[in-house]
Amino acid sequence: MYYLYDGSFEGFLSAVTYLMRDRKDLSSFRNRIWGIAVEGFEPALLPGIKTEIVPDILNDFGNYLTKNFGGEILKTIYHAFLSHESGIEDSIVLFILLARKTKQDPSARLYEDCVNKVIRASQKTRRELHRYMGLLRFQKITNPEKLKIENTTGNEICDVLRPDIFVASFEPECDILNLVSEHFANRLSSQFFIIIDRKRDTCSIHIPGEELVLKSMDKSKQSTLAYDSSFENLWCEYFKVISIKERENKTLQRSNLPLKYRKYMTEFND
Amino acid sequence: MELAQKLQILGEAARYDVSCSSSGSAGTKPTQGAKYKTGNTATAGICHTWSDDGRCISLLKVLLTNHCEYNCLYCCNRRDNDIPRAAFTPEELASLTIEFYRRNYIEGLFLSSGVVRSPDHTMSLLIETIRLLRNKYSFGGYIHVKTIPGASETSVYELGLLVDRMSTNVEFCSQSTLEYMAPEKSAKSIISPMTIVSRTKNEFSDCVRNAISVPSFVPGGQSTQFIIGAAPESDYRILTMSQKLYRNYNLKRVYYSAYIPVNSHPDLPALITAPPLLREHRLYQADWLMRFYNFDAGELVCSDFPDLDLTLDPKCSWAVNNFSIFPVEINKVDYNTLLRVPGIGVLSAKKIISARKFKTLTFEDASKMGVVLKRAVFFLTFSGKYMACNFSTSDELKFLLSDKRGRQIFSARQIGIEEINVLSV
């Protein structure tokens, strides 16, 4: 049978607590009698049990992991989960069960298949996050009144304050919107910005002085926005002159910066 | 002159300074509260884009002005060259930097300048620009500034309080080369700012250890640059001098810039000379070995063999020349010797040391952990078993270990083509 969860990390961890409560262990998992799957995507033929998120149990589980296996394990699992690789849920479950069996963080046991997969998945997420910290490009909107954004007191921001609003888009393989937005909230703390994940149609909104907000995006709003291109042109000019002609090496450029990242980068789209 | 034109001239003029990193500065941590309204530094550097020559760009690298009173032979901005000259006003450059930063094009600013009137006058212009950026625009991002050789102690100190990293380009190894290449500079004028920064940093560290509060001073440390191929200096001289600089001045990085001929002069290589890119690459590999793998410069090059082998990376070259200590047993050998095995880097060595506590490692396990077995297999045994193919001479082993460019040179030698044609590859 399959333990079904809603697709979020909290839901996944709740499903794992159900599993631990039902005393599943490594050997029966290996016989493929049960697994964890997203609601609506479970394989046919086997029955599914819906799991629910209970905040207290979730907190206790988090504390149990951190206390017994160190602070890093929850981060590793979170990053591995965000990689959205197919089958990563099973590997994470095996990872946790291995931790329980050996009574320590199994991250060093890279010869084990499940550990290798989990570590590589979490590395994949971290590397993509680090890349996008550099590759995301913000553009200033010239007609902010088209965006109807409310702050926590319910007032429309754009009418009252008329701030400079910056928008950035990207299409990451891993679900890093939350992590990337935190980085920019720290860095550009006095700036009003919106980051849009085009692949998953979600966006994060940062209003200076307030908490980050994540919501799913209304596609119809996008087409009416106009952007200010004065500094974009300057950047494109600078990008052309900074290269040394005698050392030109497009292959090296492409191996460092694959074409898939260039879609929303100003200097490659002028 | 319009801003776009200035940016074009002054960006182009600054591109030969290869220092690119934005890492290593814990200048403004986000948790320390809003000292600056916009920007912070990331301890691990962030690359923002890659230019057409394959180099990483993370900073706005420009000259404040390319007017220069010096006449250094190798420099495109030398006084005698008839090129378009421009200058930013401090306000123009500060506002340009902050707008680029807000759009996430850059991690920060890399500022150099031609020498105008005197070293100290030029320094005062640099200080004014950076002060504007830090104070008026409340910029907390990364700033790297080039010190002007001959600058006074006061101006070096004032600048150090404002920036994350400072550097002075050494360019050449000896005073005699400097005398004809850059007659207005001297070894003393270049080394003096480096001495001031390193001495001040040491004094401030002592204060901190004794719980005396001091301001932040060049938190990212110092770096420098050598030009490779403009003067007949061997790798031995360059690497021993780099090592001395690392040890005596506590430098963060030494950069090596392959000489690109821009001027014609009897004391310089001909204009058609291809830049020595492979030699530059081997020097960077040797530099990494000195910094992270505990190699001494004397182990990689010596006065009898003063240049690095171009066919092989320096680590493989050392391993082949010292083959008597190999093969070593992966499950027993200590960390420092493990670091010396070609194909095992710092990360793989640490993974091996952690993993072998739980299990005796096999060939397959090593491959899963990211060891480059193509090279490492010649130097390791796995529980006593040697898994590599046979070879008879050290030349044969060198060929088996060399990369694509190395093999091109082997083939060229066999046919009799002069190596100089493949050096620029």
Image (tube, grey):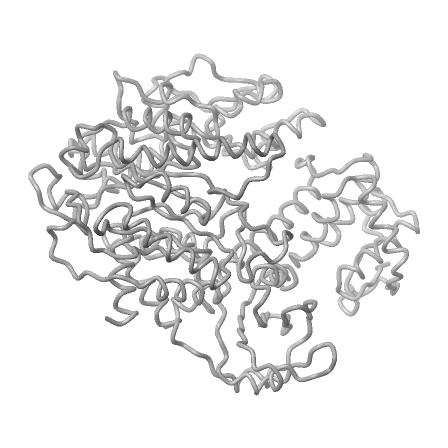
> Residue lying farthest left?
B266
Which of these two is toward me, B139 or B297?
B139
Q: Is residue B316 above or below residue B160?
A: above
Where residue B362 sits, quadrant-wise, is top right
Front in this rendered view, residue B274 or A85: B274
- Which quadrant is home to the C terminus of chain B? top left
Residue A186, image x and y in percent? 61, 59
B390 versus B180 height, above or below: above
Residue drawn at point x = 63 percent, y = 27 percent: B353
Along the line of sight, the residue nearer the viewer: B150 or A221: B150
Q: Position of residue B392 (x, y in %)?
A: 36, 17
Q: Position of residue B110 (x, y in %)?
A: 38, 52
Residue at x-position 42% and y-position 69%:
A266
* Residue B377 placement, left or right of A30: left
Quadrant of the rendered image containing residue B321 = top left
Residue found at the far top of this picture: B324
On the question of residue A260 being in view, the answer is no
Question: Is residue A227 visible in the rendered structure shown here?
Answer: yes
Looking at the image, residue B310 lies above or below residue B35? above
Question: Residue drawn 21% across and 50% down?
Answer: B117
Residue drawn at point x = 27 percent, y = 31 percent: B188
In the image, residue B265 sits, relative to residue B381, either above or below, namely below
Please state, as top left, top right, bottom left or bottom right, where the N terminus of chain B lies in the image: bottom left
Relative image position of residue B368 (x, y in whole percent):
60, 37
Q: Is residue B336 left or right of residue B64?
A: right
Q: How many marks?
A: 0
Within the image, what quadrant is residue B13 found in? bottom left
